[in-house]
Every structure is written in C-alpha cells, then in structure tokens.
Image (cartoon, rainbow, N blue to C red):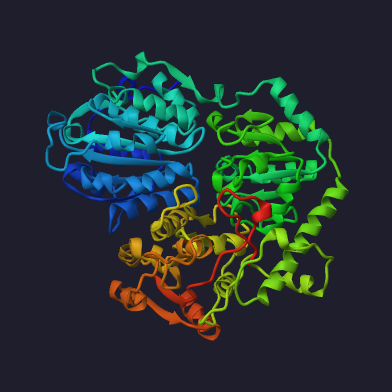
C-alpha cells in the first residue's frame, strides 16, 4: 500500500496549520490530548476548543505530568499517546517524559509550538532548539517549516510511533506554520503500511541507527525546506522489512530448541507490544520451558500461570533467577538483556546458549552475544516456530524447577523469622520440602522486612490492596523500593495492567501515568473511569504530586498508596549494604502532611500505622469516587530482597 499524499488528493479544502493538526489527530482516532497551553500553540488550542466534541483535552499541572499521562495512556490502551506543549520551557518540560517513553518503547507523539520561522536561531522569547535536545530520546523528530508538509508529517509521525519497535516522535511546529494555509485533504488510513523519506528507515528499524542518522544533520530532520511534495519521496513498505531473518537462521533456532534439555524463556515488554502473550504461553508449552519475565514484560504472562516463575534480574524472584542460571538455553523474547537483568555478563552467559527474538535488529548482540537470532514480528515468529517444533516433555527439568520453587519458599519462611541482616545465596543449603515451605507457598511476596519500629510491612500493604482490586484494575508505580515490592508480589493477571518506568527509572512518573491510563481505558471502553491504584514512595510522590490537581479536576477514582519511610529507600538500601551505612542525603527529614495536602487539592485521605488501620483506610479509599491518598508508615530499613549486587552473580544473591 502506498501512502496517499494529502496535497494531491481529490476533495481538497483550504486549511490552516492548526486545523490540519487537530483534524489529523481526529483522523488518527485520538480521543484525548494531554497538555498545557502557551503563546506558541494558541491557534492549536483554539482549534481544539472548536472540536471539543470529538477530542478531549486534559490540562495538567506541569508539562512533565502531561507527558507521563500520554505515556500511561499508551501503555494501558496500546494506542498512541499524544501530548501538546508550547515552546521554550513548555517543550523542555516534556523531555523527561519523552525519554521515559523512549527507554520503554512506548508509542507517543509530542507536538510542540515554536517561534515563527523567521525568528528561529535568534534567541527569541521562549525559543529553544527542542529538535536538537530530543534527538537522543526520540524515535524520530521533525520541525515543519512548510505548511504543505504538515499533514503528511503528522500521519508519518503516527506511523513511526506505532509500527516496528514503538517509540516517541516529536513534531515542532513554528507559529507561522500554524497560521499559514494550504489546500489539502486529511486522509485517515488505519492500515498504513508505508511512509516516505528514506532517511526514516533506520528510525523505524533501529534505535541505534536512528540516533546515528539524526546526529548527521539537523537540516535533514526538517519535514521540508521547499515546496516539494511527498510524492517525490521514496516510499518504504514496513511489512517488507519487519521480518528480516533467513530460512537458515530459522533452522538454526529450531536446531537449538530441539537439543535443549533445560529451556528458559525470558519474556520482555516486546511481547506486549507485539500482542504475543498467548503465543509465548503456547510456545512455552510446546518446548516445555519455564518463563521468567523482565519488569516490562511482567503482565504478559498471568502470575498464576504454572510456567511463570515471576520477575528475574537484580530484584527478581529467587526461583526465576536460579532457573535461568541452570538453563542450557535462554530464549530472550522482546528483551534488552540490560545490566539490571544480567549482572556479571561473563557468568550470565557461561555454559548457556542464547536465542534472541526481537523486532529491533539493533538489540541483537548489543548487550550479550547470542548463538542465534530472529529479527521480526514476535507473534509471527512464535507461530512459525510452534509449527516446526514437536511437543516435548522434559520431566527432569520440571523437577529441578520445582526444587527451585521449594527452596525459594523455605528461604521466605526462614526470612520471616529473622530480625535483620542479609543471607548470601552462596551460604544457603538446599533441603527438601517441609511444612514450613508449604505454608510459605501462600506468601505473595518474595521480599522480607527487617526489624522495624512500624508494625506495618510493605507486603501487608500490597496484599491488602490486591485483595480489594480486580484482575482488571490498573496499577501504576513510581520508582524505588515500592516499585520492586509491587513487581515481585502483586500478582498481575491481565496484560497492560502495570504501568511503571523500567528503562529510565523516572521518579515522579506514577501519578501522571495513572491519570493517563485511567482516562485512556475509560475512553476506550466508553465507560466512566474505573478504580486505579498508584503505589508510590514519599520521595517519588514529592516529585510530581502537583498532578493531584489534575486527578481532582477530572474526578478520577485513583487510590494513591504511599509507602512512607521518610527516606529515599532504594538509595539508602545501597548505602546500607555497600557504603558502610553512610546515609548521605537520603534521610528526607520532611514534615509534609500528605493527607492535609490531598485535602488542599480537593481530594481526601488518611494516615495508616498498623494493619488494623490499613483495613479501614482501604475500605474508605475503594469506596471513594475521587482521588484518595493512603499514607502508610513503613520502616526506613525495610529492604528489597532478593538482590544480586551490581555486577554480581546468582552466587552473590542476598536473600534477606
């Protein structure tokens, strides 16, 4: 299919730039835009006002919150999130949100206004080179200097954002382009498989290549410097290069799978992007493999699935970590093999073969060298592999995995009897299952709590919230210890119900993401907003708590659960374990009353110090129709375990 050129279509009409922007968004079925108005986007906002019956605008308290909301919207719905901001500080305030989406491969289109083209490069009021600033953190970006290219650029931006490996795209539109007019037709093409400009092939195919091509010349990023139309550009059919593997490469993967006796599937966020959740489970059944998940891939497999060992990596589940260490073949599907996942790479890869399946060729051999790889659509690849592979039963491997689970449960039971300190995995011994282990099997968390002055543990808080939430309830987190506790113990059952910043680790991400996700799911289902949960820490919540104003103004039923320990918990944990307890600048020593603050915003809340208070507080929170803050006091020395120290191995694993 070739991309239609709006300027050469029939039924053209005279439209100005602002009209083209808003009508293009509607044509892309954008139902919500998050943003903040300003001088250089007034014309776009005026047009949004005229089309408020078709597209809703949500004003945030800060542009960063709007970017996180667009991100959360995209993660929850699978659609492209849209954020809009003015020039200068409005645009730069989006950068952290754009980078967060980039590192987690989230489809987003960010639209910024800028000063008129004649004023560019002259240090004009609120002028900034947002194009140059965002080169490293966008899949593609543009400045549109010719009104005749605007409609096409918008359509191309959406195509790039959602096709191949998803990611954020930025479009910078000078003020005079917004007010200029041209004849064009806004063409809605839901099944677009082509877009123009050969320089953009690398952008859709590889992040690494994208960065290189963008660094070559800022001029090449201009949508058009002349009046040439997109018809003169070369069109690229996305479907022609998504699957890039040969029959020989496929045969090599099949051969490795057939000889493996201990296969382990490492499931990442790319599985969700490819809508391949069922395919991974079918593949695991076919080859009799267990599954460990990255944090970004955590909801791809239900927590209750018998093959799912949970999250792996630095703070993963013990059984998932040990099974990977014993595997003779690791099949990475839609993962990056980042440093937090691998630890010591020499040990991680020793004695194990690796297959890497990913849509982005740049990821192959980037962090670890693999024995075989397939670059393409995960869903199609897994379907092809299942058709080629015989069903297998690896009973010895199943028994070994069961042993890892028993060992994990025994350690959990032992940890509950400990008051403090850490146990290294290298000093523990394997024993057979016993009553304590069977009792521990009901534990929802793979974490422990040190002796504390608070009687409330993070695991109690998470379990109490989970008891009240349905499997379809959307959960967001900020970044830190609470994020790991939730990832380890919440027990997600449905895809796309966990919104968290994995790659960038953005404190302050959670509330904006919860707002965007809550509103996005409601718009998609055409229902009122449903109960949404934000787990956060007092440090993270302090970053962007101003978005409580947005949650209140939209009357969103968001339950904000604050794990309040008065410190920057994860950094303090590292200081405790690796810096001889020198707690430099991690004790917050703040007197913030989060409940009073919530009420000042127009929400409600309560403080919780023990399990009895927690029950009544959560009853009130889940009964509330608007935002509700539950401020839970936990101990400053609660830690996240297991933990593989940075650069360490399974033998260095700290268990609690």
Towards the viewer: 288 or 223: 288
Towards the viewer: 304 or 344: 344
Residue 72 pos. (x, y %): 44, 52
Q: Residue furthest front?
A: 580
Residue 256 pos. (x, y %): 77, 32
Residue positioned 56% across, 27% down in the render:
242
Q: Residue furthest bottom?
A: 612
Quarter of the figure with the C terminus: bottom right
Q: Quadrant of residue 411?
A: bottom right
Residue positioned 85% across, 54% down in the render:
399
Residue 436 pos. (x, y %): 78, 74
Residue 49 is at least partly visible in this image: yes
Q: Is residue 538 above or below residue 364?
A: below
Q: Is residue 409 above or below residue 512?
A: below
Count of picture labels: 0
Residue 199 pos. (x, y %): 40, 21
Residue positioned 79% across, 41% down in the render:
287
Towards the viewer: 38 or 461: 461
Q: Residue furthest top?
A: 232
In the figure, is residue 217 to the left or right of 562? left
Residue 80 is at least partly visible in this image: no
Towards the viewer: 416 or 194: 416
In the figure, is residue 297 to the left or right of 198? right
Residue positioned 66% across, 75% down in the render:
416
């Amino acid at each position: 299919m070739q991309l239609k050129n709006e300027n050469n279509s029939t039924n053209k009409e005279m439209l100005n730039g602002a009209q083209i922007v808003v009508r293009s968004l509607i044509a892309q079925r954008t139902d919500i835009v998050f943003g903040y108005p300003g001088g250089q986007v007034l014309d776009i906002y005026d047009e949004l006002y005229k089309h408020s019956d078709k597209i809703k605008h949500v004003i945030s308290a800060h542009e960063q919150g709007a970017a996180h909301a667009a991100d959360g919207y995209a993660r929850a719905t699978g659609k492209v999130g849209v954020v809009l901001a003015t020039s200068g500080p409005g645009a730069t305030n989006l950068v952290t949100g754009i980078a967060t989406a980039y590192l987690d491969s989230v489809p987003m289109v960010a639209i910024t206004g800028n000063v008129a083209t004649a004023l560019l490069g002259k240090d004009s009021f609120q002028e900034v080179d947002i194009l140059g600033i965002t080169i490293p953190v966008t899949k593609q970006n543009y400045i549109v200097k010719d009104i005749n290219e605007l409609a096409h650029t918008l359509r191309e931006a959406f195509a790039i954002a959602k096709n191949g490996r998803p990611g954020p795209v930025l479009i910078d539109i000078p003020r005079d382009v917004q007010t200029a007019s041209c004849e064009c037709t806004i063409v809605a093409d839901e099944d677009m498989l082509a877009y123009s400009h050969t320089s953009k092939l690398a952008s859709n195919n590889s992040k690494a290549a994208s960065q290189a091509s963008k660094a070559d010349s800022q001029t090449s990023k201009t949508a058009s410097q002349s009046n040439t139309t997109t018809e003169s550009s070369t069109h690229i059919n996305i479907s022609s290069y998504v699957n890039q593997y040969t029959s020989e490469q496929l045969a090599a993967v099949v051969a490795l799978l057939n000889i493996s006796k201990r296969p382990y599937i490492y499931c990442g966020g790319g599985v969700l992007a490819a809508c391949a959740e069922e395919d991974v489970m079918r593949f695991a059944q076919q080859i009799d493999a267990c599954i460990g998940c990255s944090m970004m891939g955590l909801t791809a497999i239900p927590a209750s699935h018998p093959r799912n060992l949970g999250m792996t990596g630095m703070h993963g589940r013990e059984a998932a970590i040990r099974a990977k260490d014993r595997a003779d073949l690791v099949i990475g599907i839609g993962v990056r093999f980042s440093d937090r996942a691998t630890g010591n790479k020499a040990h991680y890869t020793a004695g194990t073969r690796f297959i890497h399946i990913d849509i982005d060729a740049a990821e192959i051999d980037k962090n670890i060298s693999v024995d075989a790889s397939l670059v393409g659509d995960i869903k199609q690849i897994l379907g092809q592999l299942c058709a080629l592979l015989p069903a297998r039963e690896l009973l010895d491997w199943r028994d070994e995995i069961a042993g890892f689970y028993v060992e994990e449960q025994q350690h959990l039971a032992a940890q509950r009897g400990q008051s403090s300190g850490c146990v290294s995995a290298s000093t523990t011994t394997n024993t057979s299952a016993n009553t304590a282990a069977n009792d521990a099997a009901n534990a929802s968390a793979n974490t422990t709590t040190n002796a504390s002055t608070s009687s409330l543990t993070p695991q109690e808080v998470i379990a109490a919230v989970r008891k009240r939430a349905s499997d379809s309830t959307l959960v967001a987190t900020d970044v830190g210890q609470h994020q790991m506790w939730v990832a380890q113990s919440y027990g997600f059952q449905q895809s796309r119900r966990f919104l968290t910043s994995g790659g960038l680790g953005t404190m302050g991400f959670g509330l904006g993401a919860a707002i965007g996700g809550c509103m996005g799911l409601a718009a998609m289902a055409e229902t009122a907003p449903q109960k949404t949960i934000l787990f956060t820490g007092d440090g993270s919540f302090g970053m962007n708590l101003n978005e409580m104003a947005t949650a209140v103004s939209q009357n969103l039923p968001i339950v904000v659960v604050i794990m309040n320990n008065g410190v920057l918990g994860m950094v303090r944990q590292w200081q405790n374990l690796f810096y001889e307890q020198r707690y430099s600048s991690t004790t917050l020593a703040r007197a913030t009353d989060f409940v009073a603050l919530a009420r000042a915003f127009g929400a409600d809340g309560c403080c919780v110090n023990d399990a009895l208070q927690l029950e009544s507080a959560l009853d009130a929170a889940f009964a509330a129709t608007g935002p509700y803050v539950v401020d839970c006091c936990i101990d400053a020395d609660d830690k996240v375990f297991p933990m593989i120290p940075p650069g360490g191995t399974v033998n260095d694993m700290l268990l609690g």
